[in-house]
Amino acid sequence: MSRQTSTTPPDQGGLSTEEAQRRLAEYGPNEIPEDGGRSLVGTLKEILTEPMLLLLLAAAAIYLVIGDLAEGLLLCAFAVMTIGLVVYQERRSENALAALRALGAPRARVIRDGAETMIAAREVVPGDLFMIDEGERMPADGLLLRQQALMMDESLLTGESVPVGKSPAEGEAADQGGAAAMPGGEGTPHVFSGTLAVRGHGLARATVTGRNTAAGSIGRSLASIVIEKTRLQSTVGMIVRIFGIVALAACGGLVALYGLIYEDWLQGLLSGIALAMSVLPEEFPVVLAVFMAIGAWRLSRIKVLARRPAVIEMLGAATVLCVDKTGTLTENRMRVRMLSIDGETVDVMDGKPVSDERFRELVATAWLAARHASLDPMDRAVGSLAGSTIGGLLEECGDWPLVREYGISTGRLAFSQVWESAANRYVVATKGAPETIADLCHLPPASTKKLMVEVRALAARGLRVLAVATADADGGELSDELHDYAFRLIGLVAFEDPVRESVPSALKDAREAGIIVKMITGDYPATATAIATEAGIEGPEEVLNGSEIENMDPASLRRAVEHYHVYARTMPEQKLALVMALKDNGDVVAMTGDGVNDAPALKSAHIGIAMGMRGTDVAREAAGIVLQNEDFGTILHAVEQGRRIFDNLRKAMIYISAIHVPIAGLALFPLLAGMPPLLLPMHVVLVEMLIDPMCSIAYETTPGEKDIMKVPPRPLSDMLIGMPQLAFGLAQGLALLAACMAVYWWYLDTGTPDDEARALAFAALTVGNVGLARVNASRTLAVLEPFARGYRAFWVISGVAGVIVSACIAVPSLSAMFGFAIPETRDLVLAIGASLLPVLVFDLSKLLPPVGRIMGRMPRKTATKSLDGQIS
């Protein structure tokens, strides 16, 4: 039989062109308008007020003032590059709305002036009649007037992977448009903008367009969400401001003091500049940029795309991971899992041939009731099962011609096909809702009750169940009513959206890392519970429904999210409310998803994680991180990278804080004590622009601590470098300053020439610098494993630093420039030994529990949260 097409009924000629133009002017284009957004000028204004960038520009100005053109221009170039990268990232964050606008069908087939015509989707207006065919996306929200076996995939709005059948509107609803409905309903007459027709065809009247559609409401929700700064960005900004104020005050004070006491204003200005340069932590923005850039590159190697690299460090603080079921925990595809006949079940997950003739007939009948070139996932699952289990039987009926289809309609949730099996003999195969099939088979109440018990038992395992029946018919005219056929129930076919293989082990790793996993889905509670159990989500068995969430006030919802771990039948606004409630409770929330319905929650969460392969553009643009391989286990690898980055950043910041103390002290104290200047601007440039940045960058290559995923997430209040870390760094710096000052004072006091004493003190500073860098790189004793794997960069840097400093001392032209002279070997060994003494002391101090906590070690007993969300 030839396939029907959606022709225009005689009484439905559509709008006239003039009326359509009038409505277009009245309602506006069928697109989601852009929000106000920030202009490029506004974005630049915000960037130029960032303390890190201001400090970078100030450092560049200082280098230019002192005549160090190369370093000054380099920092200026880096500032311009930073501005460009930030502008690029900020503008990309506005792309979620653009992706949502592109989601709708770019073209639409409508009825205008009684004839079918193709127009741009943005020109569709309320009242337009648009035609629907398999594989097309809906151009607007609408009311279905006519349909033939129409099935819609509404997962972009609901998160539910199973297509839903549609029925035409009848009576007054068809004339007036009917009441608004929610996406995902079975047998409803409503279709929604951006959803996909996977089977059948039909005709619908547009009811709302543009921002008033269901997809448009999500766009408005996205536009109202402001992406928060990460803790790292805020903390580094605070540190930079503190150091900047101290640098300016120290510079001005030293210039005034030296000028007034010694009346040498030029030397005072040079010394003040040297002191300011020694205090200004230009390494902070450099180190942060390097860690984020290389961290993003490392994540890309495991198929994780960091769209906003700053969220990488937030991964390490994640306390709650909210996951969407469809496409995240599961594979977002259907497969047949169980066959059932009279209470006897067969598991067909392995795809092995079926030998029992009863079950072979069940599979064959289900195949005959499925459209063979359909996009419907259940039809495709039946076809795949039939091909692998009853291949020989398919050869017998594979050439039968299809005579007729009976589509799904209101009150008849079943799809049937009639095949010509022999001359004047027909086979009618049907599959659908078990209660509908029971009615078609005219089962007695006792048999129907028994059937529904089997259905509930399968549904409790998270399976979707269809019943299958068959009937024979003589040749001639086929009845328009399925009840005229003598159907015989064959059995039940149960489908599952399988859990990804990597999920159970990843959830186990998450629990060991102290991360609570919560599942948020649009599916039914029984299915959600079964999937949560199979995946390994631990916690109370109760499920919180979307309708219950809708009726909760914010305080009640905040209490509820501490108890429940599985949420079912949720809509986009409810997912967003759950994320906001968790954030209000102080949790750091990571949210995964792949559909349009996930986008608001993805953008609101601290870490939005989109599934890349199946995910929509809207979800990818709203998220900060995209999993390109959709391996759920990759999330835990990303969390580990986030923890390692924060851990190593803290170590680097402690080191930077420490090394600035001896640099600043050696530039200041000799002048206050009446000694010859020890560090002039060129010495500070050598230390800070060569040795310090190299040592800081080396921290990025440092491996993570062995127990990094066996401890709980750091508290949200845990700053990158708080007072304990700052005090620890300052203590290290003061100890090294004392050692270097002692070397300088001792050799000056014993009559050693100024140039030799300066060379010895500078050599001590260099060795102590490298030593502190290595000691702060791990929480274990560096003295016991100095050449441990992963720390090679520190020894490479040590060698480079040694060569450069040796050249500055030994090469006459360089030694004259830096004011050095070649010291005695014995004196050099003593100076180096003096600088290593405080390094050794601080290395051994790691054995003390307080020092371990300062460096980030968490007690094992606090490594988990209880199932109700409280720290245990």
Image: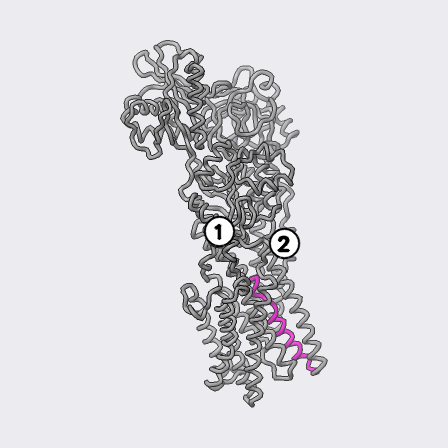
C-alpha span from label 1 to label 2: 39 Å
Secondary-structure class at tag 2: helix
Compared with residue 251, is residue 406 higher up or lower down, i.e. above or below? above
Q: Quadrant of the N terminus?
A: top left
Disc 1 marks a residue whose amino acid type is Ala
Which residue in the protein does label 1 denote?
A: 513
Compared with residue 602, is residue 159 higher up or lower down, i.e. above or below? above
Q: Which residues are magenta?
A: 263-287
Q: Residue furthest top?
A: 476
Which residue in the protein does label 2 denote?
A: 44
Point 45% across, 32% down: residue: 462
Instruction: Say few, some or many: other residues with alpha carbon within 10 Å of mark 2 (under 14 / 14 to 19 / 20 or more).
Output: some
* Residue 549 colored in magenta in the image: no
Secondary-structure class at tag 1: loop
Q: Residue furthest bottom?
A: 751
Residue 97, can we see it? Answer: no
* Residue 270 colored in magenta in the image: yes
Q: Is residue 392 left or right of 609 when viewed as pictured?
A: left
- Is label 1 or label 2 in front? 1
Main secondary structure type of the part rendered in magenta: helix
